[in-house]
Amino acid sequence: MESDKPLALAGVRVVEMGQLIAGPFCGKTLAEFGADVVKIEAPGGGDPLRNWRMLKSGTSVWWQVQSRNKRSLALDLRQAEGQAIARKLIAEADVLIENFRPGTLEGWGMSPEELHRLNPGLVMLRISGYGQTGPYRDMPGFGVVGEAMGGLRHLTGEPGRVPVRCGISIGDTLAALHGAIGVLTALYHRKVHGGQGQVIDVALHEAVFNCMESLIPEYSAFGAVREAAGSALPGIAPSNAYPCTDGWVLVAGNGDSIFKRLMAAIGRDDLATAPDLADNAGRVARVAEIDAAIGAWTAARTVQQVLDALGAARVPAGKVYTARDIAEDPHYRARDMLLEQTTRDGDTLTVPGIVPKLSATPGRIRTSAPRLGDDTDAVLAEAGLTGEQIALLRAKGVIA
């Protein structure tokens, strides 16, 4: 059973100070593989994500995924006593995650220099809009701004129309994943090479920019500015979305042999055997003609008919999934990508599984997302505070 297998990050202690998406998604990823993540939240309201989008029993279902496997410490970091407690926890931690505006931690007496004096081995992940240095460092930045500055937003949407977002907070998530890579790399360096702790500086726009493929090399070499192309993949053909009688289908026929099989499947042997279409460069030159041929064929068929025919021809194709499609798909279930999770209010939710899948040390859901301050007393007791000290802090409003 998966629950009998060891967790790769068991014993790694993480203090998470971030809120909303970028920092907490990194914490979520580490926690799923066994890290003990203590999430510090402001007393009263806690992380605003608790109230974002659709609520079930008064709490966001998004929160239930983002904060599973974490412990909640309700601590007021604006008060000196709260900052002292945070420093006490950080002194014993392996990792600190924060995604405040640059300078916020410094204002609380928790600069990297001060924290590394307390804990030389601390790995400190700092996610911000523009990074900890540079002329824009003090500007506020959300994921959507990072997506725009990183070059993504200019490429989304149909040519000549308003640039659209991809529908999720991809800038935040990309920053979180880059942050997780940085944390694991720094932990490896500390353990294997005897290195000290270090600061990982992740800017939202840089995480997006890092995924922008050949955008800048093409500009550097040719002065080419890549533009929005709708559902097509510029310079790669054919790869597009095509209409069916009951929806859309995505077809990726851009491999040389795949293209020949695709053309045979749609009854266009003339295109399959055309010498100038034998490689990608030739197909790009005639992409409009190729797309029209594929579109004419798909338009007379249902999505399933297209998928069946192209599957038989070994041509990569797929339908555009909705949430309902995902929830009903047997492959998702077979791969444990749809799991049942019970909240602390007793609700049962279907939630995303864990990625990536490790054979010997797979991640898992160990605990449901905490209520605000569920673990305050336990965390402070572990830090050495007595019951009387905890009660006094609660009376002062430092903790909840």
Image (cartoon, helix red, strand yellow):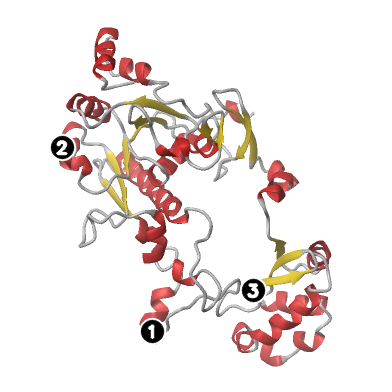
Amino acid identity at mark 2? Glu
Is 29 placed above or below 170 here? above
Q: Please provide percent x and percent y for residue 147.
A: 41, 61
* Sooner in the amino-acid sequence: mark 1 or mark 3: 1
Residue 221, label in figure: 1
Q: Which residue is mark 3?
A: 239
2 and 1 marks in contact (CB < 8 Å):
no
Q: Which quadrant holds the N terminus?
A: top right
Does dot 1 land on a helix, a strand or a loop?
helix
* Sooner in the amino-acid sequence: mark 2 or mark 3: 2
Q: Nearer the viewer, residue 308 or 169?
A: 169
Q: Which quadrant holds the C terminus?
A: top left
Residue 278 in view, yes or no: no
Determine the CA span between mark 2 and mark 1: 45 Å
Q: Nearer the viewer, residue 319 or 222?
A: 319
Determine the CA span between mark 1 and mark 3: 25 Å
Residue 114, label in figure: 2
Q: Nearer the viewer, residue 317 or 187?
A: 317
Q: Please provide percent x and percent y for residue 221.
A: 38, 84
Question: Within 10 Å of the Cα at label 2, are there few (<14), some (14-19), or many (20+) other Cα atoms?
Answer: few
Is 119 placed above or below 160 here? above
Q: Nearer the viewer, residue 130 or 142?
A: 142
Is 115 placed above or below 265 here? above
Amino acid identity at mark 3? Ser
Residue located farthest toward the bottom when viewing the structure as drawn: 275
Which residue is drawn at the image coordinates 47% and 55% (left, top)?
Answer: 170
Q: Please provide percent x and percent y for residue 115.
A: 19, 36
